Image: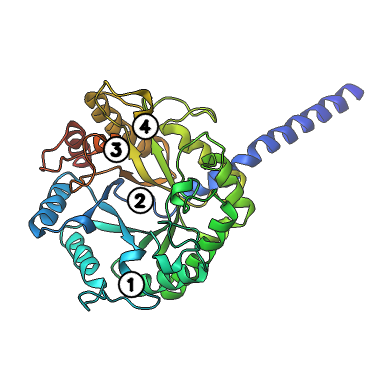
């Protein structure tokens, strides 16, 4: 009898331990059954359409994107251009509506079957706490809320996804100030609520965080920053987690590690979501890709490190395939970037992310994406 009791006790302890181990996966299992905004065309890209002045180039860019199977355009809508004065969406020089250019871009995207993801940031001087600096933090976060409300109201029925800010864990995206997750979450809270007031059906994407290991007045590691966001209550103020997923010089199947910068680092962000009870939300990748800079520059030039152009094509296609097959929680993967208009010169490393050259020559990665996207 004593032996039987010991066996039963041991069995009970084993079951309890098993239950404790599985409890962390319980909400992840539930999320697998119903996860919104993942049953979408995963192929997206960042664009610079607002910088293009020639109509035929706008149309050519979107036509090539459509032919490549790109279904999403992640496009910045600079607040500074849209609301030059508080509450006034008028260009003082021309006395024309500042909405006109952006309306045209949204309509063109729609005509090519490409949906817009609107990135909202770049505040005007009147809204900045330090007007001389080009980005946040803001003098009054409510000003951003008012802008978000105006934007979502204006594009209701046309733009369903908005990204609130970009990479706030870097100093130069935070007005040359030390990044502050508490300040960002307050801005996110106000922006989220005002967006939902304007259109309850709009989806709010949190700002993708820069992948970094640095902790200094210039930067906060992305994993730490996301943890801080959750501690500040961010869970209630976004529908989709925005994340960046550059591959640096590692292949897509390089395993994640807190001490490594690679594509799979996004898995660690997902783990933070799950630990904070947020497994029911998807992740969309705001900036993704590999840099194919030429050799011969000093090491500090290779901010994103480098791979060959052949590797860039292979890795870019393979990474999206990995996300489709293994990461049920990922929706859109926005490649950084489709084509720029010539403002990024070849002596800057970011020039070498492009899928298509300024002169509309497709690179190897563009051909690889077109091949795979057409198989959807």
Image quadrant holding the N terminus, namely: top right
Residue pointed to by mark 3: 350
Work out how far the residue at label 1 is from the one at label 3, CA to CA, in angstroms: 33 Å
Work out how far the residue at label 3 is from the one at label 2, CA to CA, in angstroms: 31 Å
Contact (Cβ within 8 Å) of mark 1 with mark 3 = no
Q: Secondary structure at mark 2?
A: loop
Q: Position of residue 198 (x, y in %)?
A: 42, 75
**For this rendering, which residue is in front, 32 or 198?**
198
Q: Earlier in the sequence, mark 4 or mark 2?
A: 2
Q: Residue at x 24, y 34 (%)?
A: 347
Q: How is the image coloured?
A: rainbow
Contact (Cβ within 8 Å) of mark 4 with mark 3 = yes
* Residue mark closest to the camera, 1 vs 3: 3
- As displayed, is residue 269 above or below residue 119? above
Task: Determine which of the numbered discs, if any, sits on residue 304 in the image.
Answer: 4
Work out how far the residue at label 2 is from the one at label 1, CA to CA, in angstroms: 22 Å
- Give the image quarter of residue 329: top left
CA neighbours of label 1 inside 10 A, class few (<14), some (14 to 19), many (20+): some
Q: Position of residue 29 (x, y in %)?
A: 54, 44
Q: Secondary structure at mark 3?
A: helix
Contact (Cβ within 8 Å) of mark 3 with mark 2 = no
Q: Earlier in the sequence, mark 2 or mark 1?
A: 2
Residue pointed to by mark 1: 156
Q: Position of residue 100 (x, y in %)?
A: 21, 72
């Amino acid at each position: 009898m004593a032996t039987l009791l010991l066996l039963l006790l041991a069995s009970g302890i084993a079951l309890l331990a098993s239950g404790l181990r599985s409890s962390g996966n319980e909400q992840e299992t539930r999320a697998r059954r119903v996860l919104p905004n993942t049953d979408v065309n995963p192929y997206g890209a960042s664009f610079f359409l607002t910088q293009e002045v020639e109509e035929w180039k706008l149309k050519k860019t979107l036509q090539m994107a459509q032919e490549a199977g790109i279904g999403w355009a992640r496009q910045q809508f600079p607040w500074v251009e849209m609301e030059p004065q508080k509450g006034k969406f008028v260009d003082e020089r021309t006395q024309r509506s500042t909405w006109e250019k952006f309306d045209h871009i949204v309509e063109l995207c729609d005509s090519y079957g490409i949906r817009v993801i609107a990135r909202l940031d770049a505040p005007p001087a009147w809204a900045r706490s330090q007007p001389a600096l080009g980005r946040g933090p803001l003098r009054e976060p409510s000003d951003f809320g008012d802008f978000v409300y105006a934007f979502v109201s204006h594009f209701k029925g046309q733009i369903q996804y908005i990204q609130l800010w970009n990479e706030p864990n870097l100093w130069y995206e935070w007005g040359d100030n030390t990044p502050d997750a508490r300040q960002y979450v307050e801005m996110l809270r106000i922006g989220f609520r005002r967006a939902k007031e304007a259109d309850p059906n709009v989806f709010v994407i949190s700002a993708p965080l820069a992948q970094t290991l640095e902790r200094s007045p210039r930067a906060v590691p992305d994993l730490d920053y996301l943890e801080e966001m959750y501690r500040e209550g961010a869970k209630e103020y976004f529908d989709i987690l925005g994340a960046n997923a550059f591959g640096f010089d590692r292949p897509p199947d390089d395993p994640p590690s807190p001490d490594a910068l690679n594509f799979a680092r996004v898995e660690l962000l997902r783990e933070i979501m799950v630990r904070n009870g947020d497994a029911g939300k998807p992740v969309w990748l705001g900036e993704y890709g590999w840099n194919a800079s030429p050799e011969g520059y000093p090491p500090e030039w290779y901010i994103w490190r480098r791979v060959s152009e052949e590797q860039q094509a292979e890795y870019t296609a393979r990474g999206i395939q990995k996300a489709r097959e293994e990461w049920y929680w990922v929706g859109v993967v926005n490649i950084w970037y489709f084509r720029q208009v010539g403002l990024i010169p070849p002596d800057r490393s970011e020039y070498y992310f492009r899928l298509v050259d300024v002169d509309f020559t497709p690179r190897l990665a563009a051909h690889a994406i077109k091949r795979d996207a057409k198989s959807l």
